[in-house]
């Protein structure tokens, strides 16, 4: 075939493809100009919470780098290049905070002062991977409910970076980097409950965070990932690495898990200006929030504000699929065991007695 005939065929096919219409449906595809700002109070308060999360991450990463010496970092297996990665993650948080400030405008929250309870490099890394865990999950929980789809797009592009941060901190801790099939979404009130204890004071002009702060939940025998083993035994080594196939699990199905929790009415967070609250009835269940699933176990041996349960062994899609309980996940005490799915998880808020707490299952 002559070249001219081949070229003509290509041009003809290209014209045919261009004539196919865009599939019907979709949001924000009609050519209208994007508006990257809140369209409701729900939008403002959700993004305001996310901004407060970005500010503490910026402070935390810089604080840890300044708090510990080069020798302390290197004793934990983290060299100059690893420390620079933490520094770069702090720089990422500058960008994230600027983005959300631009979205919220002149009423955007400013950086606060914070408190941390870690004393070693390993504990610092562990706290970073836990903080980025609930920061990430807290946005997944509300992202699809925002009125402003345009703002949601920008927030999505920042929170995917935070997901990478969380995985890096797991690698720094010697944990398996991504032990789940799906990431978890939690509600704004759950995220605020986890964030609030670390904020000490804020500028007076910062907008109030209008989400419920639930009573605190404590897992008294939470698995601990901060132990450091550099013994080259496969499955035991917890030095920083791209991946470790850990043969010694942090937790397992059937493990007894013990809880204590606070009564409502406690003053918490910056300037003690927030009061914990719950609308739930008596404590009866433990809810496990992980991946796509919400699983309940019975709360037993209840004595005042303490009790225990057993770690469930369910899987995401049934036999031979991923275990639900893995990674850094969430547990809370509830009064009932209502059925919820990722899109309507906020229905749990009315039934939380205390929590959530982060459960370091793997």
Image (spheres, helix red, strand yellow):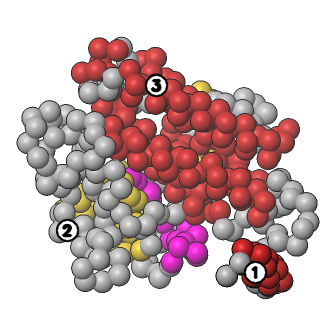
Give the structural element (helix, strand or loop) at label 3.
helix
Q: Earlier in the sequence, mark 3 or mark 1?
A: 1
Whether residue 66 is visible: yes
Q: Where's residue 201, x and y in %?
A: 62, 29
Label ID, residue 5 = 1
Q: Residue at x 22, y 35 (%)?
A: 239
Instruction: Look at the image and give the residue range highlighted in magenta.
Output: 341-359
Q: Earlier in the sequence, mark 2 or mark 3?
A: 3
The CA span between labels 2 and 3 is 38 Å
The CA span between labels 2 and 1 is 67 Å
Q: Are marks 3 and 1 in contact (CB under 8 Å)?
A: no
Residue identifier under label 3: 84
Q: Are marks 2 and 3 in contact (CB under 8 Å)?
A: no
Q: Where's residue 74, x and y in %?
A: 28, 20
Q: Residue at x 46, y 30 (%)?
A: 86
Q: Where's residue 17, x and y in %?
A: 76, 81
Label ID, residue 333 = none
């Amino acid at each position: 075939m002559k070249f001219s005939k081949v070229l003509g065929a290509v041009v003809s096919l290209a014209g045919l493809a261009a004539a196919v219409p865009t599939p019907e449906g979709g949001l924000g595809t009609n050519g209208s100009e994007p508006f990257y700002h809140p369209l409701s109070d729900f939008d403002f308060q959700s993004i305001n919470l996310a901004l407060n999360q970005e500010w503490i991450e910026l402070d935390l990463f810089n604080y840890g780098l300044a708090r510990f010496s080069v020798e302390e970092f290197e004793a934990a297996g983290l060299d100059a290049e690893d420390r620079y990665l933490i520094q770069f993650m702090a720089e990422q948080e500058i960008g994230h905070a600027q983005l959300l400030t631009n979205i919220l405008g002149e009423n955007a929250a400013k950086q606060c002062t914070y408190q941390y309870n870690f004393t070693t490099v390993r504990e610092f890394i562990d706290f970073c991977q836990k903080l980025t865990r609930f920061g990430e999950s807290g946005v997944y929980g509300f992202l699809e409910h925002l009125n402003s789809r345009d703002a949601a797009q920008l927030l999505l592009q920042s929170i995917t970076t935070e997901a990478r941060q969380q995985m890096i901190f797991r690698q720094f801790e010697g944990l398996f980097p991504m032990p789940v099939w799906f990431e978890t979404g939690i509600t704004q009130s759950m995220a605020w409950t986890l964030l609030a204890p670390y904020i000490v004071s804020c500028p007076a002009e910062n907008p109030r965070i209008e989400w419920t702060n639930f009573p605190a939940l404590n897992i008294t025998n939470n698995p601990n990932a901060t132990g450091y083993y550099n013994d080259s035994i496969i499955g035991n080594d917890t030095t920083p690495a791209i991946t470790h196939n850990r043969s010694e699990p942090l937790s397992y199905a059937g493990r007894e898990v013990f809880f204590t929790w606070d009564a409502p009415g406690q003053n918490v967070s910056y300037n003690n200006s927030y009061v914990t609250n719950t609308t739930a009835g008596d404590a009866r269940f433990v809810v496990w929030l992980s991946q796509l699933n919400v699983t309940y176990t019975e709360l037993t041996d209840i004595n005042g504000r303490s009790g225990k349960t057993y770690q469930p062994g369910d899987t995401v899609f049934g036999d031979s699929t991923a275990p639900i309980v893995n990674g850094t996940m969430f547990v809370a005490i509830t009064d009932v065991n209502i059925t919820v799915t990722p899109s309507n998880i906020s229905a749990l808020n009315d039934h939380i007695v205390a929590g959530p707490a982060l459960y370091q299952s793997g």
